[in-house]
C-alpha cells in the first residue's frame, strides 16, 4: 500500500515560495543546509540556498518540495492544499501579511493564492 510522502510544487523561485509555506504552516520549516549540502550545490554551480533549484520544507507528516521550472503558472491548479484555522479572519490577515492574496470569500471558507499564484483554501 502506497503512503503519501511529499507534495511537490513547481515554481519559479523555490527558496522564497518555500519560506512562505514554512511560515504559513504550523510546525513547518525550510530544511537546514549543512556544509555537505552547500558543497553539493556549489558543485552544481549554485551559489547558495537562495538559488537552490529544489527546496525542502518539513515538519509534519507530509513534506513539501519546491522545484524550479521555467514556465509560469497559467491556469487553475489541478491540486491544491486545504488549510484549517481556529480563527479564520486572523489567519487570513496573517497569510496576506506573508504574501498571500485573498481571491474569494464563502460562508465559512476562503480561497487565497500564494506569492506565485497557486490557489489554496482556508476554513
Image (tube, rainbow, N blue to C red):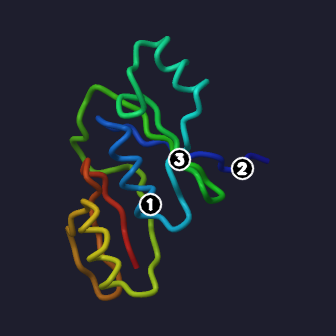
Q: Quadrant of residue 85?
A: bottom left
> Element at badge 3?
strand
**Where 61 sits versus 6, above or below?**
below
Residue plotted at (61% across, 54% down): 62
**Where 115 sits versus 81, above or below?**
above
Residue identified by numbered label 2: 3
Judge the density around disc 3: few (<14), some (14-19), many (≥20) Cα neighbours within 10 Å.
Answer: few
Give x and y (percent) for residue 111: 29, 69
From the viewer's side, name the closer residue of 51 and 117. Answer: 51
Q: Quadrant of residue 98?
A: bottom left
Residue identified by numbered label 3: 7
**Where 100 sits versus 115, above or below?**
below
Task: Compare marks 2 and 1 and give the one earlier in the sequence.
Answer: 2
Could you say which disc has been placed on residue 81 in the image? 1
Per the model, the C-alpha gap separating discs 2 and 1 is: 17 Å
Task: Compare marks 3 and 1 and give the one earlier in the sequence.
Answer: 3
Judge the density around disc 1: few (<14), some (14-19), many (≥20) Cα neighbours within 10 Å.
Answer: few
From the viewer's side, name the closer residue of 62 and 30. Answer: 30
Give x and y (percent) for residue 105: 23, 79
Q: Is label 3 in contact with label 1 (beta carbons under 8 Å)?
A: yes
Amino acid at each position: 500500500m502506497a503512503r503519501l510522502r511529499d507534495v511537490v510544487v513547481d515554481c519559479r523561485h523555490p527558496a522564497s515560495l518555500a519560506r512562505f509555506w514554512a511560515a504559513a504552516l504550523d510546525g513547518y520549516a525550510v530544511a537546514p543546509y549543512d556544509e555537505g549540502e552547500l558543497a553539493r550545490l556549489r558543485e552544481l554551480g549554485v551559489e547558495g540556498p537562495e538559488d537552490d533549484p529544489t527546496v525542502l520544507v518539513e515538519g509534519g507528516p507530509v513534506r513539501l518540495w519546491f522545484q524550479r521550472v521555467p514556465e509560469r503558472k497559467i491556469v487553475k491548479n489541478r491540486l491544491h492544499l486545504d488549510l484549517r484555522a481556529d480563527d479564520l479572519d486572523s489567519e487570513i490577515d496573517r497569510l496576506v501579511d506573508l504574501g498571500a492574496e485573498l481571491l474569494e470569500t464563502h460562508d465559512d471558507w476562503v480561497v487565497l493564492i500564494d506569492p506565485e499564484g497557486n490557489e489554496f483554501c482556508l476554513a
